[in-house]
Amino acid sequence: MGAAGRDFHDFNVRFRSNPAYEIVAFTFTQIPLKTRVYPPQLAGPLYPKGIPTLPEEALPHLIEENGVGEVIFAYSDVSYEDVMHKASIVSAHHADFRLLDPRSTMLRSKRPVVSVCAVRTGCGKSQTTRRVCSILKDRGHRVVVVRHPMAYGDLTKQVCQRFSSLEDLDTQRCTIEEREEYESHIDNGFVVYAGVDYELILRKAEQEADVIIWDGGNNDCPFFKPDLHLVVVDPLRPGHELRYYPGEINLRMADVVIINKARTAPPEDVDTVARNVRAVNPQAKIIRAASEITVDGDIKGKRVLVVEDGPTLTHGGMAYGAGTVAAKEAQAVMVDPRPHAVGSLAEVYRRYPHLGPVLPAMGYSPPQIKELEQVINETECDVIVAGTPIDLRRVVHSKRPMVRVRYELRELEGKLEDVLDF
């Protein structure tokens, strides 16, 4: 059971060459994919026809039709309650429900590895990764970033992807979500690898790196065995660090915990998170940090449409992001885009009723990007405030001025320089 990421990696590492198991299917959820096949080129000689990938709703039927004895849960940022709902479905259909030890799927590198992970989507991994890369680059290291997978396209073309220019993003038909994770690293001069086969990716990255940075996705655990494991927690969601799978695993394994947004969150919530960290991982070093926001234009007092990072708002469970914070600080008036939502965006608002007058930047496919562009252009406002990690102006055409919100990590107590000893 997965979401086109951890599931494929676990299969490649633990089951692809293991004749003791027969994998009958992958199921997918969280992302808008169509039924497809994990191709024979990736599935290996035990699966000459590949392996079907089907919606998770088909799980009970798959278990009964194939006499499945074991179901492996392999995706991230899921509440403990939801994990047990999945387990109950599996058990009710007479199969075992299994969670793999993340260490058993970690590949070992010949180079030092720094992993940047989190306890929830939207804690601030990207800005933390940028800060780590900057420190190591300033020390003269060749740094290569390897990103958690987002294999939503043609898997045979995504086996091992290398991005070193913005043109690479266009050539490889990256979604908005992929661009959000790759673009800033490329802008800062770093090579990014991603794809499906992380053994191959790791060996390619080792050839041009002194230090490899694992840039995690959602709240998943690293695919590479880290020499230093950094984990970001979010005091705007106090307690979530102990209630979401596999975020708590990350927290318990962490060498360093970064409490981000420490200036934005109420002090008592920052203290609550710090206590929770100490309770489960007293050996971890704690760094308190702020997410410093800047806007590349004037929005003071204006009517604005705020576009936020899609994954943070959806499976991250946040009602707002950096764009909203910037708009409120500028005393701008936020215009509600929801009356103009069409297609997949209308479905996003139905599925995530906690969302208010913000527009999630969803863009897994060209039609979805067109829907995003349509909503942006049909919402009457003075300025578009793009709070996404990318320059949205490169992806959609807006009839109105668009300003970009940037956010960078700034340490308040403790320093990342002191723990990056490579």
Image (tube, rainbow, N blue to C red):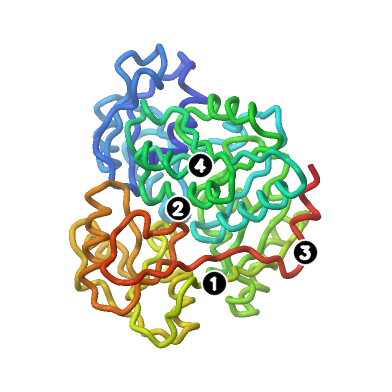
| Residue 82: numbered disc | none
Tell me which amino acid carries mark 1. Answer: Thr
| Residue 180: numbered disc | 2
Earlier-in-chain disc, 2 versus 1:
2
Disc 2 secondary structure class: helix
Earlier-in-chain disc, 1 versus 4:
4
Disc 4 secondary structure class: loop
Based on the displayed image, in which of its 4 quarters is residue 87 positioned? Answer: top left
CA separation in Å, label 4 and label 3: 27 Å
Q: Is residue 330 left or right of residue 22?
A: right
Which residue is rendered at x = 27% and y = 65% of the image? 349
Residue 354, percent from left and from top:
35, 70
Earlier-in-chain disc, 3 versus 2:
2
Viewer-closest of 175 and 123: 175
Q: Taking 406 as reference, is 181 above or below it? A: above
Based on the displayed image, in which of its 4 quarters is residue 214 positioned? Answer: top right
CA separation in Å, label 2 and label 1: 17 Å
The residue to which callout 3 is attached is: 414
Q: Which of labels 2 and 1 is toward the front?
A: 1
Tell me which amino acid carries mark 3. Answer: Gly
Tell me which amino acid carries mark 4. Answer: His
